[in-house]
Amino acid sequence: MSEIRSALDALAAEDLHALTNAQTLERTASLVQMANRVAAELTRTVRHGELTQAAEHDGMRTMRSWLIGHARLAPRDASTIVRAGRALEHFPALAAGFADGEVTAAQVDVVATKVAPADVARAEEQGVDVGAFDRDWATIAAAASHDVLKAAVELFEVALDPDGPEPDPTEGRRLTMAKHADGTVTGRFDLDAVAGEKVQAAIESIVQADRPKGDERTRAEQNADALVQLCDNQLAAGGLPTLRTVKPHVVVTIDLDDLVDPATGAGAADMGFGATISAARARYLACDGSISRMVMGPDGVPLDLGRDHRVVTPGLRKAVERRDRSCVFAGCEAPSHWCDVHHLVHWVHGGETNLGNSALLCERHHTKVHHGFRVERPPDGRWRTYRPDGTEILLGPLLR
């Protein structure tokens, strides 16, 4: 290991500006091959640790948990390494290509994700030549694209059951979400045809119902907003299963001084699943929610916990819905059950929680109003919307 470190130190000390373009590309190809070989050795070592229960030495139950806790790998990456180690025991040709640096960790995962050890055992019972598939995959991985390898791996599933019953579509469904350091979340899902149709139908219904005039969002942005709205609707309906003894809801913890300070206050509030948000974002969420007061001692121990109370009572919400009917932002007709009750003057700044100080806004436009846009309801009773520069958003002859 010390020799490897020394070699890497020497590489890092080289002056890249002295390289020609050809030398740069050659160096890159060599580094990719070396990275593959290191990844292969890491996979082999982790598998050995799994078989010997090495993680118990540090009080961890599995090598996956050790990789997450001690090596600080993302859960998805830790799972990928463990899964690859289990799969490669059954595919020596692929393992050899990986060890030589000709096969990447991502290519190994294409096989490991689709072919579990149970599938290998099933293939052997049916007389399927697993070794032939292994050799073919190793050859394809070293010379062809990911798509070609994926197609070759799918042939293994066909060989297992070419004429059998329709497989259970739920067995292939997957949803992964990764939370990043700034609290943002990225995800990926794999669904069978029927499940995908259901999701598309639900998302499309919200996308088509929320197309205000002047909407410049991309289709991807529309889909993302629709997914959030779908979750908002379910959380607000109160029909989801209980989570940690209470109905699932968004939890935000913020100091009172940060909440009442009109400054943005980056990183001032913590959310229930670990994300950190600004005080401004917390004030937006506090427009229409339940508030709990907690008095903390100097040692960080709670001394007093006040009772939860809703900022907007059910009665007031009914009155606002009756008056506004839908989102009041210019050009939006989002239905009332998609909307929050927004305080025109925030209650933390002295605004009253009453009908005159309330407006119905959908999730997207509620966010806009907390980022510079403004809605007002003059004595004529018609809502007006203003841009951050003070100009009014007009819809021509279709004013309401």
Image (cartoon, grey):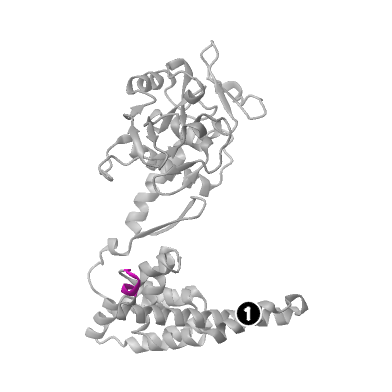
Above-or-below relation of 307 to 141: above
Q: Which span is picked out in magenta?
A: 55-60
Q: Position of residue 388 (x, y in %)?
A: 64, 30
In magenta stretch: residue 58: yes
Residue in the foreground of this view, choosing between 114 and 162: 114
Q: Position of residue 353 (x, y in %)?
A: 43, 19
Q: Which residue sits furthest top?
A: 379
> Is 59 on the left or on the right of 351, as rendered?
left
Q: Position of residue 241 (x, y in %)?
A: 25, 44
> Is 134 on the left or on the right of 394, as rendered?
left
Query: Please, what is the dominant secondary structure of the magenta stretch?
Result: helix
Name the quadrant containing residue 59. Answer: bottom left
- The residue at 45%/29% (across/down) is 287
- The residue at 30%/69% (across/down) is 61
Above-or-below relation of 10 to 166: below
Q: Report if residue 166 is visible in the image.
A: yes
Query: Three-letter amino acid code at disc 1?
Result: Asp
Q: Report if residue 211 is visible in the image.
A: no
Above-or-below relation of 242 to 370: below
- The residue at 33%/20% (across/down) is 315
Labels in figure, total: 1
Above-or-below relation of 191 to 277: below
- The residue at 33%/74% (across/down) is 57
Q: Secondary structure at mark 1?
A: helix
Q: Position of residue 115 (x, y in %)?
A: 34, 76
Q: Which residue is mark 1?
A: 9
